[in-house]
């Protein structure tokens, strides 16, 4: 700041003004003024949300409409939540997370904002799993009776193999009518992953008792029956396909049962349907290759093996099956190379070892 006193450029004998420290009262007033200024400054910068012009046609009409309201009321948390929710349903999860985080910044005590932020992080398959967990825990701290948040956190723990934590959250949800059967299904998976098949099957029966048309419960029961080679497996697998004919795992499971029963034409039909739903289904591709080889269609089997390897170049069984097919076609050198490739991926693959021995 410039003073009214001229700069001293040489030795002068003029008197200088005397500087006095402010009194305690004056200091108190200065401190209060600084605090007040800081509070006003923080408040004016409280909104760090994203600006979107209502005239920006790269966004949907609904986003632009909400943005127009935000631009007039930039500290309204609910508006950011609404825009974030719109982004979420437009599957623009990164944009949604940005708006939900701004809503939380403006109103950190709203459990819904934390829940939606975590839901978006999961939908985006975010690597920041801790952030997902923290938002869900915060949502439950704010609102303990929040079944949606409890269910999502239980799924999070299940994916992280923290089974006891998952089960602890799911047990109370089995008493909630809107969550009961789904909670039982997740509990069943948690028990299965812990090798407790008795509890897993018992719980899945509870899920089906609550809701016989729960698709995931039907699928889990089908898998349990398949593992036991139960004669009712086909009936339950067929029910799963009828319930959802566009679910690749239901189609694949039914095909697998047909293959086991040596109904190969039906098996190929359902494997093909599974691939149409999910072109990246590795096992459906590979199992068609196996069936083609059984019928001496060695070249076609090799084609299906190559399709499998396009999806996963390190799938040892596919390399091994190519070796077998090449051996049957009389191409021993190519067969030996495929067997060796299979063993380089899986040194314990017995079929590849047997293949090499049969060539030598």
Image: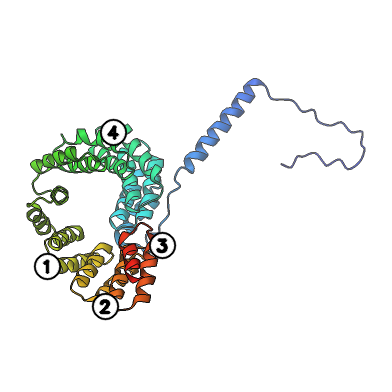
Q: Residue at x 31, y 62 (%)?
A: 60
CA distance for labels 2 and 4: 62 Å
> SS of the residue at dot 3?
helix
Q: Residues within 10 Å of mark 3 (few under 14, many from 20)?
A: few
Q: Secondary structure at mark 1?
A: helix
Residue that label 4 marks: 143
Q: Nearer the viewer, mark 3 or mark 4?
A: 3
Q: Residue 310 location, x and y as percent?
A: 34, 69
Q: Nearer the viewer, mark 3 or mark 1?
A: 3
Task: Identify the residue shown where x is 69% and y is 25%.
Answer: 22
Q: Which mark is residue 299?
A: 2
User: What is the spatial separation of the Cα atoms under label 3 and label 2, in whole angstroms?
Assistant: 24 Å
Secondary structure at badge 4 equals loop
Q: Which mark is residue 344?
A: 3
Mark with earlier residue (4, 1): 4
The residue furthest front is 360
At which x and y percent is residue 25?
Answer: 62, 21
Callouts 4 and 1 close, C-beta under 8 Å: no
In which quadrant will I find the N terminus?
A: top right
Q: Quadrant of residue 11?
A: top right
Place of residue 184 in the rendered image (x, y in percent of width and height, measured from the top left): 17, 40
Residues packed near mark 1 inside 10 Å, few (<14), some (14 to 19) or many (20 plus): some
Nearer to me, 356 or 305 = 356
| Numbered badge on residue 266 | 1
Q: Quadrant of residue 148?
A: top left
Mark 3 or 2, nearer chain start:
2
Against 337, residue 212 (above or below) is: above
Sequence-wise, which precedes: disc 2 or disc 4?
Answer: 4
Q: Residue at x 21, y 40 (%)?
A: 187
Label 3, label 4: how many angstroms apart (C-alpha)? Answer: 54 Å
Query: Quick one: 134 or 343, which is closer to the camera?
Result: 343
* Nearer-the-camera pick, 258 or 35: 258
């Amino acid at each position: 700041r410039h003073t009214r006193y001229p700069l001293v450029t040489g030795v002068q004998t003029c008197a200088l003004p005397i500087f006095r420290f402010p009194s305690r009262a004056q200091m108190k007033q200065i401190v209060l003024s600084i605090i007040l200024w800081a509070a006003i400054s923080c408040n004016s910068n409280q909104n760090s949300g994203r600006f979107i012009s209502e005239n920006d046609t790269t966004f949907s009409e609904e986003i632009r409409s909400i943005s127009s309201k935000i631009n007039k009321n930039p500290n309204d948390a609910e508006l950011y939540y609404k825009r974030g929710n719109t982004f979420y349903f437009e599957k623009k999860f990164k944009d949604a997370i940005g708006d939900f985080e701004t809503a939380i910044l403006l109103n950190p005590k709203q459990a819904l904002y934390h829940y939606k932020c975590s839901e978006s992080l999961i939908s985006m398959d975010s690597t920041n799993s801790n952030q997902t967990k923290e938002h869900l825990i915060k949502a439950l701290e704010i609102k303990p009776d929040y079944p949606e948040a409890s269910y999502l956190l239980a799924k999070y723990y299940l994916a992280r193999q923290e089974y006891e934590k998952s089960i602890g959250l799911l047990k109370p949800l089995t008493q909630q009518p809107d969550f009961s059967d789904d909670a039982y299904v997740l509990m069943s998976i948690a028990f299965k992953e812990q090798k407790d098949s008795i509890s897993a099957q018992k719980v899945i029966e509870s899920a089906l008792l609550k809701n016989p048309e729960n698709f995931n419960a039907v699928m889990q029961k089908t898998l349990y029956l398949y593992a036991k080679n139960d004669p009712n497996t086909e009936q339950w697998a067929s029910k799963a396909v009828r319930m959802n004919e566009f679910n690749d795992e239901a189609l694949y499971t039914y095909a697998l049962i047909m293959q086991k029963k040596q109904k190969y034409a039906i098996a190929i039909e359902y494997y093909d349907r599974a691939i149409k739903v999910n072109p990246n289904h590795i096992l459906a591709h590979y199992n068609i290759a196996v069936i083609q080889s059984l019928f001496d269609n060695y070249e076609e089997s090799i084609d299906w093996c190559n399709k499998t390897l396009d999806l996963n170049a390190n799938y040892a069984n596919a390399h091994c099956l190519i070796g077998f097919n090449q051996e049957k076609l009389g191409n021993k050198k190519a067969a030996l190379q495929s067997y060796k490739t299979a063993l380089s991926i899986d040194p314990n693959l017995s079929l590849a070892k047997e293949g090499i021995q049969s060539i030598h």
